[in-house]
């Protein structure tokens, strides 16, 4: 399953410090939770117009919903946002059924996401991963995502209007513990 966490951050003075906290402390804490397989953070690109989605996206491949309700998650991965909470806006969490782990992006790659269907991504020559919401907010109910390698990165203006582009803020972290079940 793919667990998504999305938000924007409303205080420019502390945003860099918050990003350091999330990328350098929060993600390593999450990947240490039993049942987390991968974790990576992304930032939406705006292509010269305001972003219509939350600015930040974290993708985590997990074994299932039970991971998010377990003691290990509460002790190591949940919470820890008290200092930043007043500035976190447009916060959303979703759990999606998937056919594989979240794609790992390298420097220069883009993560392309569409809630409208796979068509636009397929027309770009990509093979999108289909996601079906199964828990938490459940909205959007479906999403399709694909990794666009840096060598194929188009001008941002060339993206279809139903596709949002994200760039990686971190490398994908991978658990060293064997998965508890299939994705």
Image: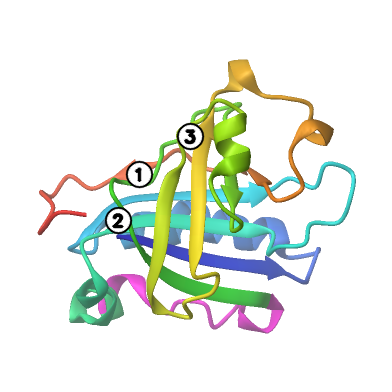
Q: Residues within 10 Å of mark 3 (few under 14, many from 20)?
A: many
Which sits earlier in the primary sequence, circle 2 or circle 1?
2
Q: Which residue is mark 3?
A: 105
29 vs 66, left or right, is right
What's the residue at 60%, 22% (across, down)? 150
Whether residue 86 appears in magenta in the rendering, the answer is: yes
98 vs 81, left or right, is left
The mark found on residue 173 in the picture is 1
Q: Which residue is mark 2?
A: 31
What's the residue at 77%, 47% (across, down)? 161
Q: Residues within 10 Å of mark 2 (few under 14, many from 20)?
A: many
Secondary structure at badge 1 equals: strand
Question: 72 and 7: which one is in front?
Answer: 7
Q: With respect to residue 48, does 52 lie above or below?
A: below
Where are the magenta residues, as a range?
75-88
Residue contact at pointers 1 and 3, CB within 8 angstroms? no
């Amino acid at each position: 399953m793919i667990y998504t966490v999305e938000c924007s951050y409303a205080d420019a003075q502390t945003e860099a410090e918050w990003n350091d906290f999330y990328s350098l402390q929060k993600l390593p804490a999450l990947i240490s939770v039993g049942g987390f397989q991968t974790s990576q953070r992304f930032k939406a690109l705006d292509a010269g117009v305001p972003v219509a989605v939350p600015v930040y996206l974290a993708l985590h491949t997990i074994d299932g919903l039970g991971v998010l309700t377990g003691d290990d998650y509460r002790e190591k991965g949940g919470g820890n946002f008290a200092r930043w909470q007043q500035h976190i806006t447009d916060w959303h969490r979703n759990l999606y059924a998937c056919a594989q782990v979240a794609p790992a992006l390298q420097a220069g790659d883009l993560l392309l996401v569409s809630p409208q269907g796979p068509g636009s991504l397929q027309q770009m020559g990509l093979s999108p991963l289909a996601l079906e919401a199964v828990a938490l907010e459940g909205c959007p109910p479906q999403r399709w995502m694909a990794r666009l390698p840096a060598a194929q990165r188009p001008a941002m203006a060339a993206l279809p209007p139903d596709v949002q582009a994200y760039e990686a803020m971190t490398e994908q972290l991978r658990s060293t513990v064997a998965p508890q079940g299939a994705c």
